[in-house]
Image (cartoon, rainbow, N blue to C red):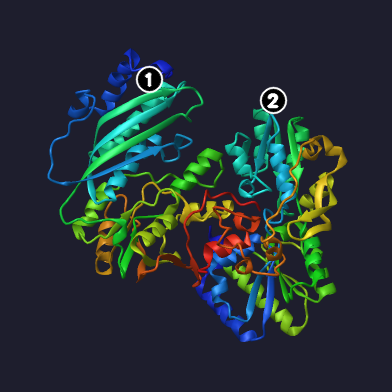
Amino acid sequence: MKYFDEYRDKRLCQSIIERIKELTTEEINIMEVCGTHTMSIFRSGIKDLLPENIHLISGPGCPVCVTPISDINHIIALARMDRAIIATFGDMINVPGSSSSLKREKADGADVRVIYSPLQALEIAQEFPQKQIILVGIGFETTIPLLASVVLEAKKKAITNFYLLSLTKLMPPIIRALLQSQEVTIDGMLCPGHVSTIIGTKPYQFIPDCYHIACVIAGFEPIDILIAIYHLILQKIKGEPQVENKYRRAVREEGNLVALNLITQIFSTVDSEWRGIGIVADSGLDLKSEYSDLNARNFIVKVETTKENNQCRCGDVLRGVVTPLQCPLFQKLCTPENPVGACMVSSEGVCAAYYKYSSV
Amino acid sequence: MTDQIITIDYGSGGKLTNQLIRSLFLKYFNNPILNKLHDGAVLPPTNHRIAFSTDSYTVSPIFFKGGNIGHLAINGTINDIAMCGAIPKYLSVSLIIEEGTSMQILEQITCSMAEAANKTGIQIVTGDTKVVNKGDVDGIFINTTGIGYIDSGVHIHPGRAQINDAIIINGPIGNHGISILSSRENLQLEESVLSDTAPLADLVQEMLSITKEIHVLRDPTRGGLATALNEIAQSSQVEIEIEEENIPIEETVKDACKILGYDPLYLANEGKLIAFLPEQFAEEVVQKMKTSRYGKQAATIGRVITQGRSEVSLKTDIGGRRIVGMLSGEQLPRIC
């Protein structure tokens, strides 16, 4: 697939890096708010290639990492129900709740299945009509239309043993909450390509308008990311922050209207809890009342009280306040084999990226 | 026989077991040592050093694109013996079969095992069959144990990697991992990816014909290339550097990894080997490998850069550098 290779050209990468070096020696902080960006940056060794004055800070863009322990406990409680089958994306099975995880529950006999597409949950529901299939719906705007289409499909096919636990989150409200908190100095925001494919470019306009911060939407190949960094720095130097779309091959200004309509048809906006950040107004989605018969929140289950390791700094890592290296548990008590916090579990987690790819 | 299913009685040790051995296993595995149907195999004496290895195969699904559990069980143990630099000679095969398995499937798998063994000239000389209750295993589990002879002058083990050793691979990585995944999850990939399951014993002997100075051989199966290199770095206490642009990966595997969020360095292989050998022999060995069926895309992918510290790093294709750790748990599909 040549579509990727031209975005990994070594010479072009090096020439962009040279141009970045020529731009400024000023300290510049750029936040990437997408786990896929984080992993791409680490996998390609981009951090290693950038000049020392350019700091890349990872934000709350990994859907597994931002899911709070209370929600993990809730999923575990659902998994313990008789006749329940939990269908989930992979990384969620490893995330520790207060005293267990889905992997542990599976070993103890719970029926937990890793799926590759939300549609697989419906297939499981049809295969096991006597069971209650609960799809763990995590993700940002990229995943939400798929979840919505599965809900519609379940209705269309009159599948009555399928339920969705919507833990979905929205990107613009959390970016606003972060910028409002002013905990971290951010000069440029590297905006997520996948999410932008759905929501378009307009929802980020508040970033330059209200916070005077540069903003570039980028794809996930090394050249995509380097070009975005170059333009973020350029915007900062010129003092002319704006929303620039450098992922035109996938992102249109108005986004994907079909997907957006699907989302508003099925979901309504709710306040949502983010790990380490707390409740953020209007930052999550839940099923509309007309779909309440599919809402897994209606199961009455005993959810374990939330207990957190108070040394775990996942929350601070997600807000960009500290790097994983500043967490006292990193690489000691908290490793991918024995994760304390979600940032070490998820393949898109910041701590996992530092652990896997950095020589520390 | 082909429309029958395996019932629990076939594992009883009685008449039906005997019938299965005679009508199926002896038919395909036929050789003078096995045909004696002794409790164990009596092997002729040898002056060689002996390599000895065992492995169990529990792949799901048992048939996948490019192979089945039968090939895998034979090739896997052949390769484990070959990685000691040995010429594989004898194998045992032990089957644990789920009741209800069709006789036709068992025959297909048996036939594949015989074909795989014949390709390398290894003899299946002893075995065992158990049938367990429905649900106790997933179709068929196979254990194979093998014996091979090591020529004098060959000293291969994971603790022998040395500074300035070149690291060679015989072809593209990740095919088996993606093939299994696409068969298991019924992923509709643009082009199918075939498993690379293959016996590597002949290839190893061809490499050894250029130089016996091969320090390490390893087949990067589960955990992939990254994990195998880390194990060698630890055993030899060396720092290894590999170059992303030199690592062969098929485009279809690359694309599947992009979609699923997998790293090909951690995908399983069943027909690949990595070799550590002094740099001066690298080019000649690679050229020799390229003349062999299972080494056509052989390449030098890196080298040992320092001694005394165990680490694996990757020079990325854009010129960056990152650490390559061991696989931790299973690779899981991406979310967005």
Q: What residue sits right under mark 1 in the picture? A: B11
Q: Position of residue A233 (x, y in %)?
A: 68, 79
Q: Position of residue B14 (x, y in %)?
A: 33, 14
Can you name the residue that lies furthest to the top here?
Answer: B15
Looking at numbered disc 2 in the image, what kind of residue is underneath it? Gln
> Looking at the image, which residue is at 64% across and 51% down?
B335
Q: Is residue A110 visible?
A: yes
In the depicted structure, whether residue A22 falls above or below residue A7: below
Q: CA distance from mark 2 to mark 1?
A: 34 Å
SS for dot 2: loop
2 and 1 marks in contact (CB < 8 Å): no
> Looking at the image, which residue is at 48% across and 30% down?
B138
Query: On the image, which quarter does residue A332 sit in?
Result: bottom right
> Looking at the image, which residue is at 64% across and 86% down?
A25
In the depicted structure, whether residue A246 falls above or below residue B76: below
> Looking at the image, which residue is at 59% across and 63% down?
A330
